[in-house]
Amino acid sequence: MNIPNISYVLASVLFILGIKKLSHPKSAQNGNTLATIGMLIAIISTLISEGSLNFELIFIGMIVGTFIGAIFATRVEMTQMPQMVAIFNGFGGGASALVAAAEFLKSDPITTFTLTTIIFSVFIGTLTFTGSFIAFGKLQGFITGKPVIFPGQNFFNAFLAVFLFYIGYQIINNPFILPGQKIDISFFYYLVAVSAVLGIALTIPIGGADMPVVISLLNSYSGIAAAATGFVLMNNGLIIAGSLVGASGIILTNIMCKGMNRSLANVIFGAVGLEQETLGNDTTKQITVKSYSTEEAAMIFDAAEKVIVVPGYGLAVAQAQHAVREVAEFLETQNKQVLYAIHPVAGRMPGHMNVLLAEANIPYEQLMDLDEINPEFEDCDVALVLGANDVVNPAARHDTSSPIYGMPILDVDKSRTVMVNKRTMNTGFAGIQNELFGYENSIMIFGDAKDMLQQLLKDLKDL
């Protein structure tokens, strides 16, 4: 009986069940637990099946990894989750590249197939590592969120890609002269260096508006790198796990592209986030906003019967999920209907808003995606927009010059009253002003989302 392969099959089943349960906030925690158990089974099976291992070093590595993971899990804020995912993608790609490099540096002769998979693993793993940390820097603010472009950039990237093929050809077609003798190691160093530069070059021109897609794509890359390393080691568990991550990442990337009505090529080469001469300052001057106090807003809520809350990144930054739940619960005691509109790319990361609202114990039944909620806006009395920007910009429907043209948006402008809460009039990730703010049925309530909601609740209770 092949115990390791049976264990890998069991782990794979748990991975698949875990991914399935991650599709809904209510079952996501159980899904995460199932996937964790599956990974534990795969690790134990691999350690047992291998013969000569230094278990002391392995144990030390597990302790260090557990310690780092616990720090991330307990200290990272929900608003920093995209950055953490980007870092983990980078670590995954880097780990795959290191393992493949270790196999290359062994003294044993390597078959052409293994050598090819090593090259592929090192290439994808290194590219994922550097690209993920560029994405992290953009999200964290270490690197500008605007696209960084230069003349001939696409030609430069194409040159690097062709040069990588040349390097791979040189590595594969320089045979070993004697058993255990390596080819010129400099080609391997070129492979690592060019892959690292290409990872940076492909990520640096992508603007902040496209970071959700980039994160999903890099997640897929890390899975592909792991699967390639699985072929290097001929480890079925790693091949299956890497394939699952790679496939799910590609599917999620496709979903995100559809949510923004953009192709993957347009995301990579479109450079959304650049300052637009036809937009920007000129558009800002044309918009006249109506600023309201929370007391005035409370009176509007008092007369409303149906309220739709649109959470955005501003809500996440202010950690206002509990405050919005308290306001919603009070409105419901007044026999008002409250729903939540969730856009696929709201909050920088797929599912970000769902997790954030679930953390505040907001009923899952009230969370509605874009297709479900858009028909509801036509008979909505108040749409409360909390820190969202590009996902509610009507320009996406009619302004062909806008970089977000064609992106599916939440139709909040069709509500009787649109209340928008923002700290300032700064633009969203796409770098353009939102024409919604100047609409006749739109009012602005400036300030921190949490503070505003807490004051609004007091004013509602005083009516």
Image: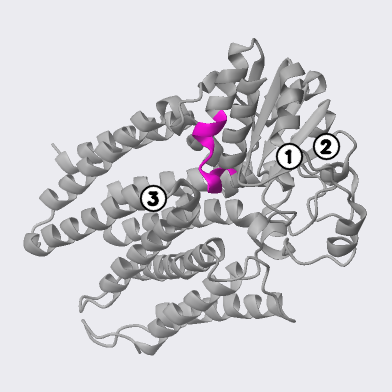
| Point 28% across, 88% down: residue | 177
Residue 15 vs residue 371: left or right?
A: left
Answer yes or no: is residue 396 visible.
no
In this picture, is 203 found above or below 326?
A: below
Q: Secondary structure at mark 1?
A: strand
Q: Residue at x 87, y 67 (%)?
A: 277
Tag 2: amino acid? Ser
Q: Residue 320 magenta-drawn?
A: yes
- As drawn, the label of residue 242 is 3
Res 267 → quadrant:
bottom right
Residue where numbered disc 2 is placed: 442
Q: Are marks 2 and 1 in contact (CB under 8 Å)?
A: yes
Mark 3–mark 2 distance (CA, rounded to whole Å): 48 Å
On screen, residue 156 above or below 143:
below
Q: Which residue is mark 1?
A: 420
Disc 3 marks which amino acid?
Gly
Q: Which residues are magenta?
A: 315-324
**Residue sitting nearer the eye, 106 or 211:** 211
**Observer able to see residue 47:** yes
The way the protein has been coloured in the rendering is one colour
Answer with mark 2 or mark 1, whichever residue precedes in sequence: 1
Residue 256 quadrant = top right
Q: Nearer the viewer, mark 3 or mark 2?
A: 2
Q: Position of residue 351 (x, y in %)?
A: 53, 39
Query: Which residue of the protein is positioned furthest toward the top in this rendering?
Result: 335
Q: Nearer the viewer, mark 1 or mark 3?
A: 1
How far apart, in angstroms, are the residues tagged by discs 2 and 1?
7 Å
Q: Where 368 falls versus 314 (above or below)? A: above
Majority secondary structure of magenta residues: helix
Q: Specify few, some or many for label 1: CA neighbours under 10 Å numbering under 14, 14-19, or 20 or more.
A: many
